[in-house]
Image (tube, rainbow, N blue to C red):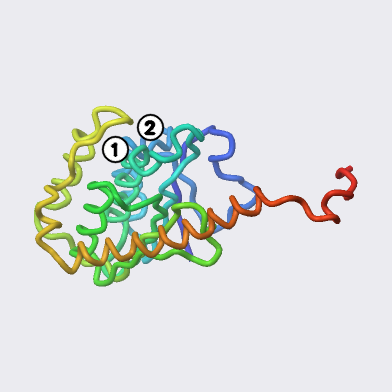
């Protein structure tokens, strides 16, 4: 079994730990050595490196640490990296392959566009909230199964969007018109139901934490010695 991975070079906590890498795993940092997936050339270099391996699975962590003061905007802040990782999967997977991408919320037009386009590109598309994922946060996973060949012109469109649709890290152009998604009632209803279900569980869990923090300590907690 072989694997490949790309990440930012020389960034503490993000770079690969050499002692944990298996022999069949090849770390790579793109054509410029930075590992920056915001650069299309680095995605192309990854695709060239993996072309002979017929990859069946791609996984991506579509998030990064954001300050507490902007935590509610993590979804939109992450738009560029989530699209880049989604695009990278299209470049490296062979037909029949699967893709898993971590997301934070799926409310913004561009997040919904990724879900919508994925339904044309993969046979099955799911949003999953695993049991190990903290119920109080907005983390969820896009799971795409059985990659199909891209229709003619789609890759060129995605490449152009990636190069021109992000003037900086804080702004992004609309990937596709929202009217295209709104015409598909089954899709829009499914996204709404999924968001409602995750948000409802998140609300209950957050309220439990608030209630626990507001409740007076028990006798055992009150006399417990401080940790050493």
Q: Residues within 10 Å of mark 1 (few under 14, many from 20)?
A: some
Question: On residue 32, which mark appears?
Answer: 2
Q: Would you say 170 lies left or right of 198 here?
A: left
Residue at point 31%, 39% (across, down)? 80
Question: On residue 209, which mark appears?
Answer: none
Secondary structure type for disc 1: helix
Q: Residues within 10 Å of mark 2 (few under 14, many from 20)?
A: few
Front residue of 177 and 150 = 177
Q: Would you say 71 lies left or right of 207 here?
A: left
Front residue of 196 and 20 = 196
Furthest residue in direction top, as rendered: 168
Residue at point 42%, 53% (across, down)? 60
Q: Where is residue 50, by image quadrant?
A: bottom left
Residue 100 placement (x, y as % from top left):
39, 60
Residue 133 placement (x, y as % from top left):
52, 60
- Cα separation, mark 1 vs mark 2, equals 8 Å
Front residue of 102 and 30 = 102
Tell which circle, 1 or 2, labels the residue nearer the N-terminal end.
2
Residue 58 placement (x, y as % from top left):
39, 59
Image quarter (top left, top right, bottom left or bottom right) of the C terminus? top right
Q: Is residue 37 visible?
A: yes
Residue at point 11%, 47% (across, down)? 177
Identify whether 180 is placed above or below 16.
below
Q: Are marks 1 and 2 in contact (CB under 8 Å)?
A: yes
**Where is mark 1, residue-wise?**
41
Q: Where is residue 45, by image quadrant?
A: top left
Q: How many marks?
A: 2
Secondary structure type for disc 2: loop
Q: Is residue 54 visible?
A: no
Residue 96 placement (x, y as % from top left):
29, 71
């Amino acid at each position: 079994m072989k694997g490949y991975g790309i990440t930012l070079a020389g960034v503490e906590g993000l770079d690969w730990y050499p002692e944990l890498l298996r022999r069949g795993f090849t770390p790579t940092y793109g054509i410029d050595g930075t590992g920056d997936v915001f650069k299309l050339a680095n995605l192309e270099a990854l695709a060239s490196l993996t072309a002979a391996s017929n990859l069946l699975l791609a996984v991506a962590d579509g998030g990064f640490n954001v300050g507490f003061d902007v935590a509610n905007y993590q979804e939109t802040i992450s738009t560029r990296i989530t699209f880049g990782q989604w695009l990278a999967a299209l470049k490296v997977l062979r037909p029949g392959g699967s893709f898993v991408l971590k997301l934070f919320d799926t409310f913004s037009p561009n997040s919904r566009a990724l879900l919508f386009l994925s339904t044309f590109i993969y046979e099955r598309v799911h949003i999953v909230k695993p049991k190990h994922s903290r119920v109080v946060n907005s983390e969820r996973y896009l799971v795409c199964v059985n990659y199909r060949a891209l229709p003619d012109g789609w890759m060129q469109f995605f490449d152009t969007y990636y190069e021109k649709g992000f003037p900086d890290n804080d702004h992004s152009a609309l990937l596709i018109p929202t009217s295209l998604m709104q015409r598909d009632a089954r899709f829009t209803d499914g996204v709404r139901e999924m968001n409602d279900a995750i948000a409802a569980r998140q609300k209950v869990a957050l309220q439990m934490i608030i209630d626990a923090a507001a409740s007076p300590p028990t006798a055992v907690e009150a006399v417990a010695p401080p940790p050493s």
